[in-house]
Amino acid sequence: MGDSSFSSALLTLPLMACLSAAEGVTEPSAHLGRPLGADFELADWEEVSSYFEGLGRESARVLVETVGQTTEGRDFLLATISSEANLARLDEIREAARRMADPRGLGTDERARLVADGVPIVFISCAMHATETAAPQFAMEFAHALATSEESPWKEAREELVVLIAPSLNPDGQDHVVSWYRETVGTPYESTELLKLYQYYSGHDNNRDWFGLTQNETRIVTELLYSVWHPTIYWDVHQQGSSRERFFVPPYRDPLNPNLDSGIIAAIGALGGRALFDLTAEGKTGVSTGVTYDMWWNGGNRNVPVRHNIVGILTEAASVNIASPIFLQPDRLGAPRGLGEYGPSNRFPAPWPGGWWRLRDIIDYELAFGRSLLGSLVREPETWIENAVSAAERAIERGRDGGPRAWLIPSDNRDRAAVRRLVETLLLGGVEVFRATAEFEADGRTWPAETLVLPTAQPYGAHVQDLFEVQRYPEGEPPYDVAGWTLPLLFGVRRVEVMGEFEASLEPVAEAAAAVERFPGSQRGAEDVQNGDVWRRAVAALYAGESAALGTGEKTRGRLRTGADPDDGPSPVEESSDDDPWRELSAPRIGVYAPWRGSMDEGWMRWVLDEFEVPYVRVRNEMLRAGRLEDFLDVLVVPSISGRALDDGRNPGTVHPEYARGLDPEGAVAVEEFVRDGGSLITMGSSAAWAIELFDLPLADVTQGDEAGEFSCPGSVLRALPVEHDLTAGLPASVALFFSRSAAWELDEEADDERELDVLLRYAPTRVLYSGWIREPEVIADRAAWVRAEHGEGEVHLFAFRPQYRGWSQDAFELLFRALFG
């Protein structure tokens, strides 16, 4: 009897503890007033954020903070979940993580103590892509279980880990997607594409912004990762297409970027491999590994952390139709990318048999992975901390003992705005930047004081190396997307690789502005046409009714003059004689074409114009179909949008009729008449092909057709050369641009066309590839990349590439400005 009573008491204690911890803590379904993950139901940001805020009030194990504002002004939340004891010493845990992320100067005993006493930090990011709708609700259920459950692995995870949850990396987009779905569910337009980008500027490209750091959301998370928390593990929760595997877990497929630490890559594989085992043991079929997603390129929010010695995990669940369930017949299922037929494989051991797939299924798979991840970490927390410290030590050793030793940014760079932006992205990413306080020698050359120095012997040296070096994608299968991204080239910043040891007197740079404020320069340097700050001043002057002019003569070339009203005489900074040639710039009324759907290229165009404070209006199909564009426009900019989408709009039946039509025929005719009567049209990428057809221009794209052979360049940095013209005066000898399935044109010299047609930029005749991968580069060598064509009284600018590409191509922004204002 005594033994029985004792056993009953032991059995009751965990239950009582569980009830005590959960008492007063609202479950997600109770907060929503409906089952979590129900068919045809989504949670908006107010519902999700208020749940987390309530969880923070109700549980002593949860701390919820507003860590910034989104692009549209919503609160960006971060929830920290751990035991009460861990939360009480959070500052200590954070400081220990910071110290281990930079182990320089750690003694043997201190290092051992930090590893033994350290607490692994896990950062979980949800819903980067707002149409991947399950993650915010998964975050609610995951957070509730972690805060209240006394079962494994939740209880152990609270005691051994600190878990950070960003329930949505895109709250703006979450609200837009939810609002549109609620408006259309149960109608013929259910689950159709939104009328706009769900992220104000970047849309789906917000997961391509993690080294450019243009958006509020990426900047917030970047600072949290590399300046505040220094997590051990980063889990990025995503969804993919519907017809292949149900769930992807690491490891990733080849190729592997050589800058990445082998221990971090092995850790990714270990966690993913255990997850494949755990999910399969639970009966979760359709789990794949080692397919589709590689670890080559930088820039995604699971890629950049790996360059910072953080184990970066990506999971991808098969999607539903926003929140509408789907039914998939077995014969409609496709094998994971990289495999053959749909069937068992070492990388896909238990194929899903088909059937219904629901929002709740996605949440269940994500929860199963979460349990596996937490279980792996709590079984041996010291192992993961040791791995992170060792990776940081190896990064420092590689920079100290190998090459390059450092990267330099010389102080004679012409575009100070680009240098400042580059330094700002580096500082946000936790990189150490130094300023030389005296002249020094490196690799047999002398460099002046104010040169910026980035030693590679620093914890995030791999990130520096990966951004600054020239990428060479390995032979084999072509890259899926981005193969090269050398950031200084894209920004138009001269950088120098230092291979040998050197000594220099250095002081740290704390702010980006301080990095360039003491760059040497004369009055001429202050009005250098390649300086983005000078273009900002010129734009402000033009729209304030003052003058601005581009120097085109021998003495004025390379200068951008700004001043008062031209009737008042030369600008105060003007030192040349009155007869030196200048091309007066204008302040046009600019319209940016915006279709009734999300166009990322249009979004990036708006971002560039907003950054440089260029006034514009967004122009819709119906505004162009109305004709008489000259009544409100001088320049029409059409971002890269296919000719079919421009002419036909959206497919009938997929959207309300008032949004479905495109331009054809009235809008296209109105654009042609607008240019013929003196207007200016600027097109790029796919829209340039539409303009070539509309205006019957004698240009042929050599990347298409039989003569293109096997040419391919899905995403790389290429070199182009300016052609002598007033509009190209002062450009550098070579211009870096991003080529992403872009075009290259050949002029038909035999065409009977009397219109003036100027080639302003050509792809380089040799060494066209700067960074990345290209097949058969000779196809585009010396072909036209930027063309200006007269049509009637007006002109058409055609860019074969996208000068505003993802906000990366700062070196090409100036080309756009010359077309706009010249």
Image (cartoon, rainbow, N blue to C red):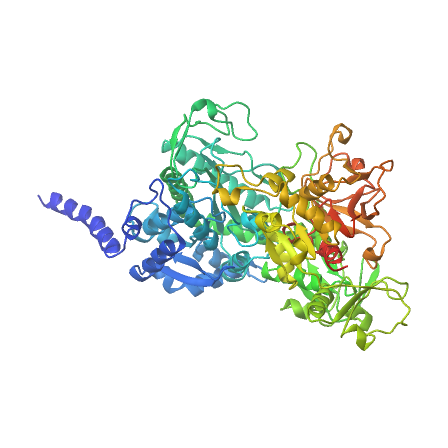
Q: Does residue 515 appear to the left or right of 748 in the view shown?
A: left
In the foreground, 470 or 663? 663
Residue 270 point in image, percent of width and height: 49, 39
Residue extending farthest left: 1
Q: Is residue 592 left or right of residue 10?
A: right
Horizontal side of residue 416 vs 366, given as left or right: right
Q: Is residue 379 above or below residue 61?
A: above
Above/below status of 763 relative to 456 = above
x and y percent of residue 784 in the render? 80, 43
Question: Could you say which is closer to the camera, residue 76 or residue 427?
Answer: 76
Q: Is residue 405 visible?
A: no
Residue 462 seen anywhere in this rendered image of the structure? yes
321 or 375, which lies in front? Answer: 321
Image mark count: 0
User: Which of the 4 image quarters holds residue 668?
Assistant: top right
Image quarter in which the N terminus is found: top left
- Image x and y of residue 41, in percent: 35, 44
Measured from the top left, where is residue 28 in percent x and y?
Answer: 31, 50
Residue at coordinates 43% horizontally, 47% vertically from top-left? Answer: 180
Can you say which quadrant of the picture contains the C terminus? Answer: bottom right
Where is 782 relative to 282, above or below? below
* Image side of residue 496 versus residue 22, left or right: right
